[in-house]
Amino acid sequence: MRSMRFATAALGAALALLTSANAFAGSANVAVAANFTEPAKEIASLFKAKTGHEVVLSFGSSGQFYTQIKESAPFAILLSADDERPKKLVDDGLGVADSRFTYAIGKLVLWSKDPNTVKGEETLKANAFNKLSIANPTAAPYGAAAIEALNALKLYEAVQPKIVQGNTISQAFQFVDTGNAELGFVALSQLMPNAGGSRWLVPQNLYSEIRQDAVLLKASAGNEAATAFLAFLKTPEARAVIEKFGYALDPKSGS
């Protein structure tokens, strides 16, 4: 009986500690660029396990999120697919200036589900396809990078009639994945660890570096969960996940 009472008391103490920890746990709404969907989910799970805080993730295009935040959408953090919009939010007086940093550097890939379709830039030059999928270049930085690469190759005018646009990089990927386009420009992270098919990692000299910046929004400057999540993104644990999904890392952004 004594050992049972001890076990019951120990369990009660453990539950009290857990309840106490959860009482101090917070939450934050995070707007996440669509290309970062899978790593964000994994990092959010690790973050919750380590801190008790929860982040509620919304996925979409960076341009759409910028507009929504300007219209007072209740986000605490923007994880953008570029560095331009987080800077604009700071300039607009909506973002915390010293919170902005590059959490990932994206890579552009030409991809097809057919293992025999993509053979480097020659695939584009041959122009022997019906549909080429890209993300909306106005709203999605990976779409802008795709147009930049096509212009650098002097192929944009030739392939432009065959381009189909997704609102986000996720939709551009889906067009190829469902067979509605034979090939498309997607983020390397979307093909990790193994999406099959054939791919060409677009050389960096054909498009501007895709520096993906995070920024804390001023309205949530006092949100402990939000500030903790931004700090967690800089830890070796989170950066290992980011690298696993094919992104390059900015050495200045590590903790």
Image (cartoon, helix red, strand yellow):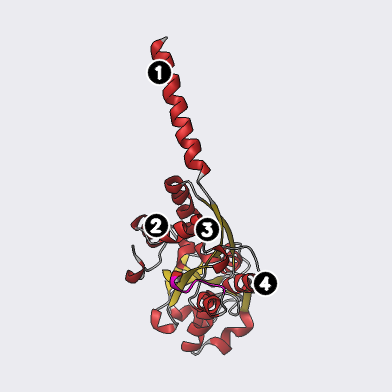
Residue 104 appears anywhere in the view: no
- Give the Cα separation between the discs numbered 2 and 3: 20 Å
* Mark sitting earlier along the chain (1/2): 1
* Mark sitting earlier along the chain (2/3): 3
Within the magenta stretch, is there residue 97?
Answer: yes
* Mark sitting earlier along the chain (4/2): 4
Rendered image quadrant of residue 159: bottom right
The circle on residue 84 is none
Q: Is residue 174 above or below residue 151?
A: above
Pointer 3 residue: 223
Within the magenta stretch, is there residue 40?
Answer: no
3 vs 4, front mark: 3
Find residue 234 and report its horizontal and vertical position in percent.
38, 62
Q: Callout 2 environment at 10 Å: few (<14), some (14 to 19), or many (20+)?
A: many
Identify residue type, mark 4: Glu
Front residue (pair 180, 186) = 186
Range of the magenta residues?
Answer: 94-98
Front residue (pair 154, 222) = 222
The circle on residue 6 is 1
Find residue 225 and report its horizontal and vertical position in percent.
50, 55
Q: Residue furthest right?
A: 71
Looking at the image, do the residues carrying marks 1 and 2 touch, with CB atoms under 8 Å apart? no
Q: Quadrant of the N terminus?
A: top left
Pointer 2 residue: 238
Identify residue type, mark 1: Phe
1 vs 2, front mark: 1
Rendered image quadrant of residue 167: bottom right
1 vs 4, front mark: 1
